[in-house]
Amino acid sequence: MNCTHSLKAAKDRPCAAPASQRLAQRLLAALLAAALAPAALADTLKLDARAPVAEPLTGHLKLGTATSPQGETLAANSRYLLKDGKPWLPVMGEYHFSRAPASQWADQLRLMKAAGIDIVASYVFWNHHQEQPGAFNWRGNHDLRRFVQLAQAAGLKVVVRLGPWAHGEARYGGIPDWVVDKMPTRGNDPEYMGHVERLYAEIGGQLKGLLWKDGGPVIGVQLENEYNIRGAGKGEAHISALKALALKAGMDVPLYTVTGWDGTVYPSGEVMPVFGGYPDEPWATSTKELPPKETHAFRFDTRVSGDLGAQTQSHQPGTAETDKDKVPFLGAEYGPGLPAMYRRRTLVSPDDIAAMLPVQLGSGVNLFGYYMFHGGRNPVGVGGTGLEESTLSGGYNDTPRISYDFQAPLGPDGQQRPVLTKLRPFHYFLRDYGAQLATMTVRQPERSPANPADLQTPRWSVRSNGDSGFLFFNNHVRQYPMPTQAGVRFEVQLPGGAVTLPSQPVDIPDGAYFIWPVNLDLDGVALRYATAQPVTRVDAGAQGIVHVFVTTAGLPAEFALADRLQVLKPGSGLQRLGVTAAGRAVSVLLLSPAQAEQLNVLEIAGQRRLVFSEQQAWVADGRLQLRGVGPHPLGAAVFPALARPRAPGLQVRQDGVLQRLALPGSIPQPTLKILPTRPAGNAPRVLKGGLANAAVQPVPEAFATAATWALTLPAKLPAQAEDVLLELDFVGDIGRVFAGTRMLDDWYYNGQHWQLGLRQFGLKPGAELQLSVLPLRADAPIYIDAAHRPAFAAGQAQAAELRGARLLTVRRMSISP
């Protein structure tokens, strides 16, 4: 008889499959058998993960009060952090409140939360608050207490980096001039420690009632920074004295940290070291490309990722090396961008940054902390004094007087940078799978690179516990082409047997990096492996449980289940894998890399939802917020759908499983009048010197040779625009923007477009700004990436050019659910 293959027919009676379908089933069965069976191919990459995971040490760390008034707990053992007794692997991002307008804090903190950040960290720069002896300034942009309160309102926890020496590319590391001029610092000198005691007491007063033990968001403090100084009254004794002063000031918190790199010293058991890494070294003195960095190579024996720019030297192992089995591997300074140094102006790509995550997580990191996640600008000191690090004030580096852009995922005015869209899926992965990952041990492959310069040997690792784990792979190294890893399969030996993946050898291209799961439970559906990266999980109500994955570019997305192998394609909607014990559907929503870069995971109307948008998306006051730059219309796609989305002019339509929201039309972009006012003179030769014996920033008188342009704002800016960005594309050495005699911002040329939000300055309509560009000399001993270094023509001695300038509106829409 004829048999209709439909859901109804499947319920009514058994049905013989057509011959073509039976052939396909036999082929899939054969593929699955091959995938699950151990492979003996020459190109199989092997790893043994059968050794049991040791139990963590507990009770040996002398930390602060772990329990909040609500009964919530925060603690640490030798391997991971714990929240309410369960493993916790959070993401932390640095945002310096005193380098940002207070009017922006609330939205920017919510944007960080929406990006998957769990903890906001911030330095308290002593010289921002007590530049002169006497009273402290905690007002306006310096209001630490309000910043912490807004972080709590945004759902973020807080780590306060106390200093007193912070570095952070600040003048004297943040210690006020009057202290540096008068007394020894960074040790237990009684006069110095008396002033530090007052600083800590002031900070403690700002945080009173906001600590974890009070029900507040402050879960930790960092003491000092990059501290490897030994000697009488220094070393472990100084860190112990600082912790005692913090406790005396009332700062009793669950976590006390110090930075752990470059031979750091601290009292073991009293604090925990945090680590970091950057994909380049702007503080280096080389004017050429650097060798491959350790941040793109898995580490199996050390937690220290090379040179992180400490300004003091140590010639012996630090406490962090001997403490490795006593404290968890915590990160605080993985660079999602790089600072601008005068002599070395590295411009990193989004992949240079995102490729670090599989490497660092696959090396055992159990707190992923970024420095900086949000860019900023230095305040100007009394009498116009610069508070930046400079060779003129004895610093090792020259940095811009005002700009602290850092190429951060969120720019100084909250701009969403392309790197942010690459990082978010990893943050969402840690939010849902971090508790499992935190307990897993790093496993080293049979073959691994001999050193970071080995670009031929595949770079990978596994973290596992029992039969479950995650496979981490990286084939991206900044500025170095990587060979295609041809005909690759992975064989992971687990206590319950070997898992080999994928079903057939694949070629992994240059630039690929990913995390693949092994024996992952998807709400009762046993996933043997997937060659796609898990991102998040959504309870879609009647549509069941949906697990979101993203494909690895160029590779098939295989999902190996107990009884079958499914090869899924992105853009196919919900693809069912099985059911939960309660009979609810378990499906996969598979995204392409481009789709994943638009993904935001937000809590709206009490439900976790997927929000796809090219614009920034976050939640404030229970409403979905969308913000975009320029003339483009605002829009988003939401899953599961909002019940009744409302906003003036909003258009709503259903597109498969996605609910599409659009606000058509745009704000006219205001016109900027540009007039050259002074040609460039002959810039003086760039000198070498300072502590680094490298190129030093020109003296102030050199700017007399700068080319200048008058930039006249329109008589009326769009009232409906939240902000207006001035975007400048110039070639030269140093750019500066003035309103009258007030410098608003400055910039070292590196090929990146320079943007400046204008609302914060209270400029009058029709105001005239001045742009000055100091010429870049062809013989300047300065590193600029080859792709952006000017191509000086024969005989051309310097360059100072304004290639473009425009105004871009920032538009925002608020959607009620």
Image (cartoon, rainbow, N blue to C red):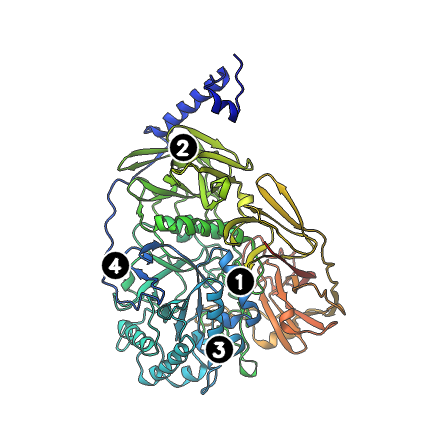
Answer few, some or many: residues within 10 Å of disc 2's Cα (few below 14, many 20 plus, some between 14 and 19).
many
Indicate which disc, 3 or 4, sits on the residue closer to the N terminus: 3
Q: Earlier in the sequence, mark 2 or mark 4?
A: 4
Mark 4 or 1, which is nearer the eye? 4
User: In 3D space, how far apart are the residues under numbered discs 3 and 1 (Cα atoms)?
Assistant: 30 Å
* Residue 561 at x, y percent in the picture: 39, 32
Q: Quadrant of residue 747?
A: bottom right
Separation of marks 3 and 4 at Cα, in angstroms = 36 Å
Which of discs 2 and 4 lies nearer the camera? The answer is 2
What residue is disc 1 on? Answer: 782
Task: Report how far apart the C-alphas of labels 4 and 1 lie in the structure.
Answer: 43 Å
**Residue flagged by tag 1: what amino acid is it?**
Ile
Please name the residue shown 68% across and 61% down the image.
809
- The disc, 3 or 2, on the residue closer to the chain's N-terminal end is 3
Q: Which of pointers 3 and 2 indicates the residue nearer the eye?
A: 2
Residue behind mark 3: 128
Q: Position of residue 340 (x, y in %)?
A: 52, 64
Residue underneath mark 2: 560
Is 480 displayed left or right of 234 in the figure? right
Asked if the residue at tag 1 contacts the one at tag 4, i.e. Cβ–Cβ closer than 8 Å, the answer is no
Q: Nearer the viewer, mark 3 or mark 1?
A: 3
Q: Residue at x 51, y 53 (%)?
A: 602
Location of mark 4 (residue): 326
Earlier in the chain: of badge 3 and badge 1, it is 3
